[in-house]
Amino acid sequence: MIKVEVSAIVNPTEDIKRVSLAIFNMFKELETAVDESMPKPRIVGHGDIESLFTMHNLLRQERQLDTARTQLNKGHSIDGLSTDFMLNKQVATVNRLNFPAIEEPLGSIHVTITASSEEELEHLKDWLAPKTEDGVPLIDLDVNDI
């Protein structure tokens, strides 16, 4: 079973609705809430594989499969059951994807994807951001293959 967790801080100079919109633009099926228990409010969201459909489509539209796969592999956990990466929240407000190299000054959208097994996580990575040759996916998994 795939679980998706997303969070982003809301700085005093930012509007909670705009940060929520940035997350919604990337993860339409995510259930979000505002966590105000920290010094800065944080938008947090939880979902499943359906939460990744928009990102799946955007990666293909924007031809960022190689970049996404690199980020998924870079964030791979030691136990092989999860991966994490960041997305630029300002770029996400306009329905675009950008993977920042480091945490941005205003904060990034943090994403953690957890699977039940290493094999399931590998299948998810192959579905979300498959290996490519000259920018063309070598495989095209259906979400039901995960």
Image: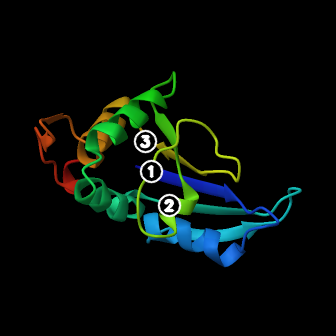
* Residue beneath disc 1: 98
What is the C-alpha distance between the residues marked 1 and 3?
A: 24 Å
In the image, taking residue 76 as reference, residue 137 lies left or right, namely left
- Mark 1 or 2 closer to N-term? 2
Residue carrying label 2: 91
In this view, the residue in front, 7 or 47, is: 7
Pointers 1 and 2 in contact (C-beta within 8 Å): yes
Residue 6 visible in the current orientation = yes
Cβ atoms under marks 1 and 3 closer than 8 Å: no
Q: Visible in this render: residue 27? A: no
Instruction: Find numbered disc 3 in the image and state the secondary structure of the residue it sits on.
Output: loop
Task: Name the amino acid, label 3.
Answer: Ala
Q: Secondary structure at mark 2?
A: helix
Q: Residue furthest top?
A: 78
In percent of the image, x 62 and y 74: which residue is there? Answer: 18
Relative height, residue 92 to residue 78 (above, below): below
Q: Is residue 127 above or below residue 24?
A: above
Give me the residue at 42% from left, 40% from top: 116
Q: Amino acid at mark 1?
A: Asn
Q: How many marks?
A: 3
Query: What residue would you read off at disc 3?
Result: 115
